[in-house]
Amino acid sequence: MTVRIYIPRDAAALALGADRVVKALSREAETRKLDITIVRNGSRGMHWLEPLVEVETAQGRIAYGPVKPSDIADLLDAGLTEGKAHPLCLGGTEEIPFLKNQTRLTFARCGVIDPVSLEDYKAHGGLKGLENAIAMAPADVVKQVTDSGLRGRGGAGFPTGIKWKTVLDAPLNAEKGDRKYIVCNADEGDSGTFADRMIMEGDPFVLIEGMAIAGLATGATKGFVYIRSEYPQAIDAMNEAVTVARAAGVLGPSVLGSGKAFDMEIRVGAGAYVCGEETALLNSLEGKRGIVRAKPPLPALQGFMGRPTVVNNVISLASVPIIMDKGADFYRDFGMGRSRGTIPLQIAGNVKHGGLYETAFGLTLGEIVDGIGGGSASGRPVRAVQVGGPLGAYFPQALFDTPFDYEAFAAKDGLIGHAGITVFDDTVDMLKQARFAMEFCAVESCGKCTPCRIGSTRGVETADRIAQGIEPEKNRELLADLCNTMKFGSLCALGGFTPYPVMSAMTHFPEDFSPAPIAEAAE
């Protein structure tokens, strides 16, 4: 009987040697005349265990990891193909605490299925949401998404249903051949974030299904996925999945035989961080320079090519199929306050157990960092945690009781952003981190607005003067004033959010912004 062995083709696993493990296993299997099939699945999200090798047995899938090419012969000698014991054996994959304690809705299939097998996708509940949406009126689909409480997972947290309703209600000029568009923002540029990449590499059909539902709900007939060029594996997976979906009638002039049209294509960005901002993304998609547009008009009314456009993040769209399958009430039952459903936490930095952890909103930051992440990888005390990517605020231990919720973080002058969580131990210099935020903004600024373009450059210079002990009090006041100008004067979130890491570092770690005492020479 053929034994199925799963080895991820996820970028994180590849970076840690997954392809070399596949080659070693293939060679050994050929030498030993073993009847195996290697499935290149997505990652389960436990990055400290990658490359993770899973073997399908009568008792379920058994995991081994992290596996090196040099481990393969020993694993086969010990009975890998039968899921037998070995020092690298982790037991049943689903029983690993990091996985078992999650609430996987959006990522339910990630790491489980062959990413580009539509049959595998359907066998695990895929396309049920789309089938339900086809049988409903567009306004009813929009209402179900609205009632679920789904908010934008890209960072802004804007209610998805309201955006969809705006596009649904937007008038079209039929004489001009007008059409509406769905644009998926897959320009995941925040450091320490990888949820978009993981879902595109590990379960691309869920994004395709979500976009098709969005198209049916709003009257849009064309979609684009804008992926950053640094994601070659995700680009390949999405292109392959779109081709398969089109051939199977999931995309095209009659979606699943409904008579309703929706098709989509993949576009690749050129690496500009600012193109993660929706209007800069639209400019880039149109072949223009990726700079921010002033709003209004909103993209929902005048977006791609000046037409009504839904711009949603990958995770927002990938969360729609479960809502259309299980219902609004099912999804809304998870979470707290106005933050409903689940959120894929991306735990990174100096942390013992880095990876993706999908859970309902409401866990405290301390539970996430210490309980799930296991504390720092260095073993030293955790000093600060940055939530929300490079533009997120730094939270000290004193704020670790803050629940993971949009409003709770906003109340503490923080933001959830794309749910990236970067951990720092007690060796971090927070003045250097504040300087980095300003430098990052200066490098990535599109240059359109003065507060961002000039303010960030002056911010770097001011941080350097503080570090040199030049008029520290005066320069701290100047840095705070620059932050205020950038926060309220910038056109987009790049300049507007850069003050979050700077001001939080100054507020919670003031000792790092004071000059070190100079030792007096002995007489």
Image: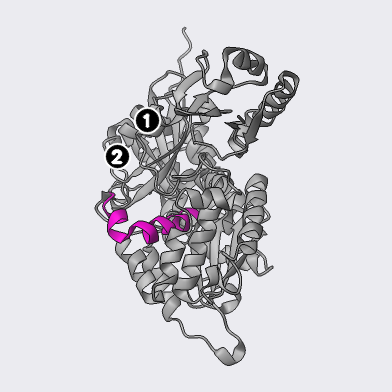
Query: Which is more toward the observer, 220 or 326?
Result: 326
**Was residue 332 drawn as part of the magenta stretch in this picture?**
yes
Q: Residue furthest top?
A: 523
The residue tagged 1 is 372
Q: Amino acid at mark 2?
A: Leu
Residue 438 pos. (x, y %): 53, 46
Magenta stretch: dominant secondary structure? helix
Mark 2 element type: loop
The image shows residue 409 at horizontal and vertical percentages of 32, 47
Which secondary structure lies at badge 1?
helix
Q: Count neighbours of disc 1 (C-alpha within 10 A) and say few if under 14, some if 14 to 19, many if 20 or more.
A: many
How many marks can you see?
2
Q: Give the quadrant of residue 7.
A: top right
Residue on which disc 2 sits: 363
Q: Earlier in the sequence, mark 2 or mark 1?
A: 2
How far is disc 2 from disc 1 in space, using C-alphas? 10 Å
In the rendered image, the quadrant that contains the N terminus is: top right
Is 356 placed above or below 350 here? below
**CB of mark 2 within 8 Å of CB of mark 1?**
yes
Q: Position of residue 63 (x, y in %)?
A: 50, 26
Q: Which residues are magenta?
A: 314-334
